[in-house]
Image (tube, grey):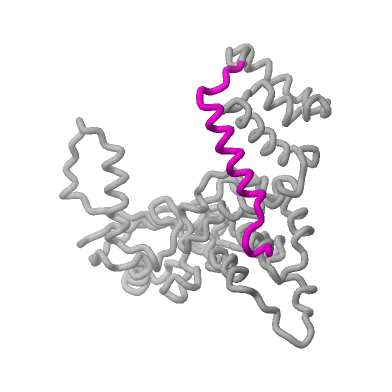
Amino acid sequence: MQVLFKVIRQEQNSPPQVQTYTLDVDPGNTILDCLNRIKWEQDGSLAFRKNCRNTICGSCGMRINGRSALACKENVGSELQRLQQIAASATTSDTVRNTSDIIPEITIAPMGNMPVIKDLVVDMHSFWDHLEAVEPYVSTGARQVPEREFLQTPQEREKLNQTGNCILCGACYSECNAREVNPDFVGPHALAKAYRMVTDSRDFETESRLEKYNQGTQGVWGCTRCFMCNTVCPMDVAPMDQIGKIKQEILDRKDAQDSRQVRHRKVLIDLVKEGGWIDERRFGLQVVGNSFRDIKGLISLGPLGLRMLVRGKFPLGFEPSEGALVVRSLIESVQSLESQPTSDQY
C-alpha cells in the first residue's frame, strides 16, 4: 500500500519545513524501515539517529504522529490503525467521510524539549546533564566493601527491575509538560533513575538523596502528574509512578512545616479525610498561608481571593460529601497498611 510520510525537516536555528515522501510499504514495516528507504532511495540528506533496530539502544526516538516513540518499535499498520481510531472518535455519527481514495499519512517530527540539530536529530545535552544531576549511580561508600561481593536478596534486586528497564531514549523527556514550562525540572527520566538509587539496598546516601530531590521544583515537586511520561515510555518504566514513590519516601520523613510542597500533600489528605473532598477556603490558608504563620503567603492570596469573590467562585460554606465516612475509612485503611512493616524489613 502507498503511504505519504510527512517529515518535519529543520536546520539548526532555522524554521521547520514539511517535506513529503511517498512509499509503497507493507503494514509490518517499522517506521525506521521506512525512514531508511527514504534515505537510501529518495533523499540521502535526511538525518535521523538509529542503531540496534531492536528496541534496546533507544537511539531512534522521535515524534510519530504527535507522540514520542521509537521508530524501530512502531510499525506502519499499527500506526495507521491508531490514527483511524482517533479519527473515528472525533467523527460524529452525522458525518460520513469516504476515505477510500485518500492516501494515508504519517507525520514524523523531532522530539520535543530539546533543540534541533538537523531534521530528526536533537541536541540531548540537557537530557544527559539533568540525569547526571541526580547522581544515578551507587554511592562510593557502598562500593567499598572489602573482600566480598555486595550481595542482595532476590526481593531487594526485584525492586530495581522496572526502573532498570529504562533505555534512556528520551521519549518521556520529550513529552514532559513540566519541562516545557520549567527548564530547571530534571525530568521524568532522571527521577525514575533517582528512585532506583533510593530503593537500592547497596546505596548509603538515601537520606541525602531525598533531601536533594525534595528541593523546590527541580526535583519531584516539579512534576505536574500529567501522565504523559507513563503513556509514551516504550519500556513500561512508568516514570511518574517512580516519582510518586520518591514523594512518599519524603513525606514519610517530613512534617507539614518543612516546606509548602510537603504541606500541600499532607493538608490535601487531611481535608479529604475530614470532609470527603477539599474545603477550598481552608486549603489556601493552610498550605500557602501555613495557618497564618506565613504572612507573605497570606498576602499573596489576596488578589486571587478578590478575583474569586468578584466572579462568585469563593465558597461561603462547606458541605461534606455524602461518602465522607467511606473516604475516611479508605484513607485510614491505606495508612494502616503503609505503617505495617513489610516482610523484607525483618
Residue 8 figure quarter: bottom left
Residue closest to the eye, 101 or 233: 233
Asked if one can make out residue 9 in the rendered structure from this viewpoint, the answer is yes
Write the start and end of the magenta stretch as one range: 318-346
Residue 203, image x, y percentages: 73, 68
Asked if one can make out residue 127 in the rendered structure from this viewpoint, the answer is no
**Residue 189 located within the stretch drawn in magenta:** no
Q: Which residue corresponds to the image point at 46% horizontal and 52% vertical from the top-left?
A: 231
Q: Which residue corresponds to the image point at 26% horizontal and 59% vertical from the top-left?
A: 3
Indicate left or right for 107 with 188 as reference: left
Q: Which residue corresponds to the image point at 27% horizontal and 67% vertical from the top-left?
A: 28
Residue 18, image x, y percentages: 40, 53
Q: Which residue corresponds to the image point at 72% horizontal and 31% vertical from the top-left?
A: 287
Tell me the quarter of the image containing the N terminus. bottom left
Q: Is residue 340 above or below residue 304?
A: below
Indicate left or right for 53 with 203 as reference: left
Residue 167, image x, y percentages: 53, 68
Q: Is residue 14 above or below residue 310?
A: below
Residue closest to the eye, 240 or 28: 240
Residue closest to the eye, 236 or 57: 236
Residue closest to the eye, 139 or 310: 139
Q: Is residue 281 above or below residue 119?
A: above
Farthest residue, direction bottom: 147
